[in-house]
Every structure is written in C-alpha cells, then in structure tokens.
Image (cartoon, coloured by chain):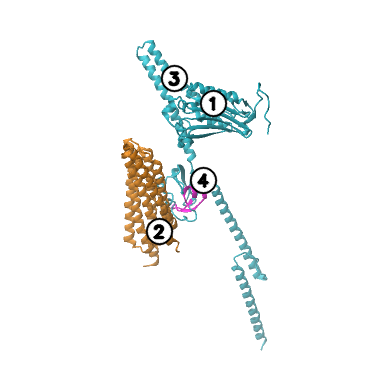
Chain colours: A cyan, B orange
Amino acid sequence: MGPLEILLGLIVVVLGWKLVANRREFAKLRRWAAQPRLTDPPEAGGAWGEVFNLLHRHRRTTLHRRRQLAQLIVRSRRGAQALPYGVAVLDADYRLDWCNDAAEEHLGLDAGRDRGQPVANFVREPGFVEYLSAGDFRTPVRIPIRDRNGAPTPRTLALQIVDFGAEEHLLLSQDVTGDERLESMRRDFVANVSHELRTPLTVLAGFLETIQDLKLDAGRVRDYVSLMAPQAERMKRLIEDLLVLSSLEHAPAPPPTNRIAIRPLLERARQEAEALSKGRHRISLAAEGAHDLAGAESEIASVFLNLVTNAVRYTPENGEIRIRWRSSDDGAAFSVEDTGIGIEPEHLPRLTERFYRVDRSRSRETGGTGLGLSIVKHALARHNAVLEVDSKPGKGSRFSARFPATRLLAAAPPVSTHSSRPVAG
Amino acid sequence: MPMGATEHISKQFETDLDTTRTRVLQMGGLVEAQILAAIQGFTSGDAAVIAQVIDNDARVNGYEVAIDGACNHIVVKRQPAASDLRLIMAISKIVTDLERMGDEAKKIARMAKRIHEHGGQHVQRFPAIRHASQIAVKMLRQALDAFARLDAASAAEVMKEDSEIDSEFKSVLRQLITYMMEDPRTITAALETVWVAKAVERIGDHAKNISEQVIYIVKGTDVRHTSFADIEKELSRE
C-alpha cells in the first residue's frame, strides 16, 4: 500500500464518518421539526448548530406573530360580540360568515350551523329581501321581528347593510321598538290634543256664528251662552292639565325635606269627592299611621284629587267609595276603592297613557280630560312612588299610590290631642 | 369529458339548487307576512291591510310558477339523482303547500273584509283565532328554518305542534256554536268566523306537510300519514 492509498483510505473513513454524523444531525433536525410544539433545538455544533438556531429563531417569531394575530381576532370578535347591535359578517353573495349573539337573537341565526348560507334564507321578511335585491343600502330598513319560540311580539328591527373590506358586507341590526313607540306616542299626542281642543271649539264657533248671523232675543242668547260656558271650561281644564303635565316633566324633582301635612290633604280630597258626588255615593275616609310625606304639596294634592274624582265619575249611583291612608315605618299607601264599573284587564297597562280612554264617550261626558292618570303617574314618579291598579270589571277598582319609607317624615305632634310621639325606629 | 368540465357543471348545478332553495325560502317569508297581515286585517278590520293581502297573493303565485319552472329545468337539464332528486321533488311539493297557504291568507282577508263591511260584529272570537294563527305562523317559520338547515329533528318538532292548533280550532268551534244558540243574529258572523278559523287550521296542516318534506329530503323516508311517535322512533334510529 502506497501513501496515496493510505491517504485515500483516510479520506474515505473521514468522509464516511462525516456522512454518518450529518445523517444523525439530519435525523435530529427532522425529529425536532416534526414536533408540533416549539422546543429548544437539539445540541449540535458547527454549521448544524447555526442552522438549528436560525430555524429556532424563525419558528419562534412566526409562532409569536401567529399568537398575536389570533389574539387580535379574538379581541375584535369579542368587541363585536360586546356591541349592543346585532353584527353579521357576510361575504360578497350575502352569505353568512360570522355573527354575534345579538344578531343570532334578532335574526334567528345560528352562527355555527348557518355559516355559508345566504342570510336571506333566514331573514325572509319580504321587506328585507327587497332591500337586499334593490341594493341601495344608504338607509336602514325596518322589519317586524318575532321571537322564534313564542308568539309574534310587536317589535321592530332596523337592519342595514354596510360594505367593508374587499367585497364583504356587514349586516347591522338594532332593536328600534322603543324609538318607534316613542315616535308614535308623540304623533298620537299631537293628534289627540288637537282633537280634544277642536271638539269644544267647534261647538263654541257654531254658537258664535248663530248669535252673529241671527237676530236673537236676549233670552235665547243667554241660553246659548250658558251652553257655551261649559265648553270653554272644558278647554280651560284641558290646557291646565297639559300645563301641569308639562311642568311635572320639566321641573326639578321636589325637595325631600319639604313637609306635606297629609291629614288636611285627605280631608280636602274627601270634600272634593262629596262635592262632585252631590250625595249620590257613600264616601268614607280612614287614615292610619302618623307620618307625613316629603315632597311637593300641589303635586300630591293633584294625585289625591285625580284618583278621588275618577272614582266618583266611574261609580254609579249608590255606590261606595273608600279613601284610605295608611302609613308605617316601611312606607305609606293612599288608596281609593270604589264599587264602580271596573276596567277590563287589557286596558290596565295603558291607563296612564295620555288621552287613553277605555270608553271615549263616557269619559268626556263625565268631564274627564284624559290626562288625569298621566298626571298621577308623573307626580308619583317624582316622589319615588308607584301607582297600583286592581280592578274587576263590573265589581269595582282600587287605585293605590305607594310611597317608599324614604319619602316619609314622622308627623308633627297634633296640636290639640295628647302628644304621644311615635317612637322612631 | 375532461375533468374540468364536469367540475364546472356540478358547480353550476350546485348554484342552481342553492338559488332555488333561497327562492323557496323567500316565498315562505312572503307567505308568512301574508298570513300575519291577514290575521291583523281580521282582528283590526283595517281595510288597507286587507286589500294589500289580496293584492299580494299574485306575487305568491308568481313565486310558485317561477320555482316550478326552475325545478323542471333542473330535472330536464341535469337529471339529478339520489338526494338531489329528492330535494327537487320535495321543493316542488313545498312550493305547492306554500301557495295553498297564500290562498288561505287571501281567504282570511276576504272573510275579514266581509265581516267588517257588514259592521255586524256580533261575534268576538278573536283571541282564540289569534292564538291559533300565532302557532300556525310559528310552525311555518320553524318548518322553513328546518328546510334551510336541513334539520330533520326540528322539522319533527313542528309536526307535534299541529295538534295544538287542532284543539284550538275545536274550542273556537264550540264557543261559536254556543254564541249561535244563544243569539241567532250572530249566525252570519259566526259562520264567517268559522271559515277564518278553518283557514288557520289548514295553514297549520300545510306547515306540517312542509316539515314532512324536510324529513324526506334528509332521511329519504316518506313520513306522510305516519304517527308522530313512529316518526320520532325512525329519526332516533341512527
């Protein structure tokens, strides 16, 4: 063997060893890379070590960035989820990609199951289908919604499509039932006020015209004037009620320190009832407890008067009206119970609406303005009190105003009788 | 045939089916609105609402014709097999049911018009009919949702509710009979109210038919004229 062969043999051995080593390193690399989780790179020296470190750093940054992106997605989804609006992400063909809980509830969608389906497969109201096909999304469209599990509830949803990103759309939904109700209440209010004022005014104008055009004797004119007076009186009352209502709405809340002596107010309510009844009803007043109220006297007086006069108006002759006041340290209640015509249950929730009348002709003929219970409700709300109504048609009604303990003041000791002050607490 | 072409055709086919399905659902939405408006017209006597329902029926019919045409087109051109064929056949039956429901809505509107024009509203059986119609509309909505999602279980749920409408119908009938016996002047109005109640009951039946078709699409079993207990057994046997 010559030196050349030895050299060659040596080279072969060295190369072979390197090859084996490289394969071992390569196997390590493969094992490491195949691991789903990021772990420290295997120990390796030289060029292999450098490669391992480079790869490791690269993997780490990628993973980190991916985690950040995922977090960003989660955060923006969470943001969309927290919105008080329904949000649905739609693709170019208005197919559902994702939606938040509010949208699921509003539109009856199921974000998981309905993904990839045209949103119009679920929101099938013709109004919305037309809106989609018309393609003019500058203003929202209003559609009625019904909750999926029960009876159709009269609620309204405003839906609007907003373009975003490349060929994608957002479908926003908002429950506008409250707005709609408010709008219609305002509309009704103006219409009602005009109507209520016009009716007596028409009568007045008619008489005035007659007096003007015809030569009437003085007695006839007097007759007419006496017919006109109640109409003018009715208009005056209506306007007064409207002013009271508006001042209740706009004035600051009554101070909680202003003492209202309750006994004289109760007595006044009874007297008023008797004056209106003219002996046609039995009217009784019972008062228990030694507390006064804190608040605005004129408002509470109008609550009492309104409830009492209502009872007189809606109770037929020989009926009974019981006015009660009861106070304790837990609160107080003023109630008026009658044996009147009663109220059908379907009217109860709407009683305190302005101009809401169970029976239009009857209310006007007895001199009501249609605003009494609205005034009661507002005045009570300003005193943290609530109005409760119990009624059986044909049997009678009980209206109770309940005041919380915070609105009570221990009554001042009566002047004439023995002074046993109530023990606080 | 080259591979690309088949793919293209099946994609086109898919799109055709999807479009038709969406059309059916839109028709369902229209019918649902029609029923609600008809009942509203019946309870409130609002002449504008009633007229709208009668006018809109032509649109329901238009949908039926268009969807039927689309189904024929798909059958002739694509010759679908298995589940696709089932879908097409079910669609054409569902559309018939929807169209009939539209007719019932129109019928209710017509009766409402007559009852309120006479002004002789002696009979007030509105709450019960309203309740029954709410159930019917809910059934329709659920059946359509089940069709959109191809959800056989919730389609089976719909069928259970039909008996509720039936019993509501019977109670309306009983009450009306009492009225008629008490006061013969109420007979005309009561009979017309019976027609309305019957129309609502029919709407419930059609909703039930639609859900039967949904089960047929999904399971391939014909569940018409089968008792509910058997259907539930069938569905749970997976």
Q: Quadrant of residue B155?
A: bottom left
Q: Circle 2 sits on which residue?
A: B215
Q: Circle 4 sits on which residue?
A: A85
* Helix, strand or loop status at disc 4: loop
Q: Quadrant of residue A364?
A: top left
Image position, residue A255 (x, y; %): 62, 28
* Helix, strand or loop status at disc 2: helix
The CA span between labels 4 and 2 is 35 Å
Output the chain of dot 1: A
Front disc: 2 or 1: 1
To the question of a shared chain for discs 4 and 2, the answer is no
- First along the sequence among labels 4 and 3: 4
Front disc: 4 or 3: 3
Image position, residue A397 (x, y; %): 49, 32
Image position, residue A133 (x, y; %): 40, 48
Are the residues tagged 4 and 2 within 8 Å (C-beta)? no
Kindly identify the amino acid type of the residue bearing the numbered disc 2: Ile
Q: Circle 1 sits on which residue?
A: A284
To the question of a shared chain for discs 3 and 1, the answer is yes
The CA span between labels 3 and 2 is 71 Å
Residue A165 is left or right of residue A297, and the answer is left
Q: Is residue A113 magenta?
A: no
Name the residue at the top extreme. Answer: A218
Q: Circle 3 sits on which residue?
A: A230
Output the chain of dot 4: A
